[in-house]
Amino acid sequence: MIVIKKSWFTLIFGSKKEAVTPESCNQYTAASLKTNPAFSQLLKQQECTTIVQLHQIHSNIGVIITTDAQAQALAPHSQEGDFMITSQPQTALSLLTADCLPIIIAHEQTKTIAAIHAGWKGISKGIIPKAITILQKTLKVCPSSMEVFIGPSARSCCYEIQNDFMPQWKKHQTRAAQYVIQNQNRQFFDLVGYVLEECKDKGISEKHIDITNAHCTLCNSTLYCSARAHKTTQRNVSLVIKNQIPYPDNYHF
Ligand SMILES: [Zn+2]
């Protein structure tokens, strides 16, 4: 697992070791994650009371969580959607992925975190600019003050596409075509590259976009769940939570 500790929030990009199976969603509860040693230390330390996990549907819809009651009502998998935004303390936002992009956006001044589940379907429906715009309008802030963290996903080395892929991007086809990589008779797509351009387009500075942990889930399929590599139903868990007690950046426990 990858743990990123910032002064006001902590982010985990989980791996196969801590994977869950969303089909058994009744088991994927706050209680079960809290008993997972990989996450329990962080959740205990940040006095987490609620873990919000949406029923992901590859859409461009999501929720803004503004109260504890709302967070608690969003029990794991109870509501459909693919992004969550909150500035609530003690509320962890959780994503399940196996090749899709887990994306975290953080806004320090307002201490707001967002978690986005972004596969090609959601991205082609504009989930990234939509989530950024909602953050911008809700918080009345400029995207240049946002930070983006992209976790492990299927990278362009392995994300093979077929001829039916591009037409599905509809009005975004021209931009998407720039991210198709030809390799002999095969075609690959650079989803991370596409997302980077969208973020920059919205005004997020490239130096505020961290892709150092955007490992390829197929190249590293022994480490990460990969739907394409293993046809698995298991998912990597990503989790982000605001810190109850701020600590200096890059603090080590
Ligand atoms: Zn790869």
Image (spheres, rainbow, N blue to C red):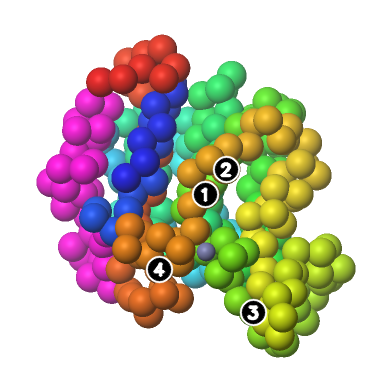
Residue under label 3 = 161
Q: Residue 92 versus residue 79: which sits nearer the camera?
A: 92
Q: Whole-Å distance between the Cαs marked 2 and 4?
A: 18 Å
Q: Is residue 23 left or right of residue 122?
A: left
Q: Amino acid at mark 3?
A: Ile
Mark toward the start of the polypeptide (3 vs 1): 3
* Label 1 – label 2 distance at C-alpha: 5 Å
Residue 180 is left or right of residue 149, and the answer is: right
Q: Residue at x 50, y 35 (%)?
A: 113
Query: Are dots 2 and 3 in contact, CB under 8 Å?
Result: no
Residue contact at pointers 3 and 4, CB within 8 angstroms: no
Q: Residue 185 colored magenta?
A: no
The residue where tag 1 is placed is: 214
Q: For the residue carrying disc 2, how many other residues have a C-alpha within 10 Å: few (<14), some (14-19), or many (20+)?
A: some
Most frequent secondary structure within the magenta stretch: helix
Residue 127 at what x, y percent from top left?
64, 57
- Circle 4 residues within 10 Å: few <14, some 14–19, many ≥20: many
What residue appears at the point 49 percent right and 52 percent down from the top-left corner?
Answer: 215
Magenta stretch?
A: 19-47
Q: Secondary structure at mark 2?
A: loop
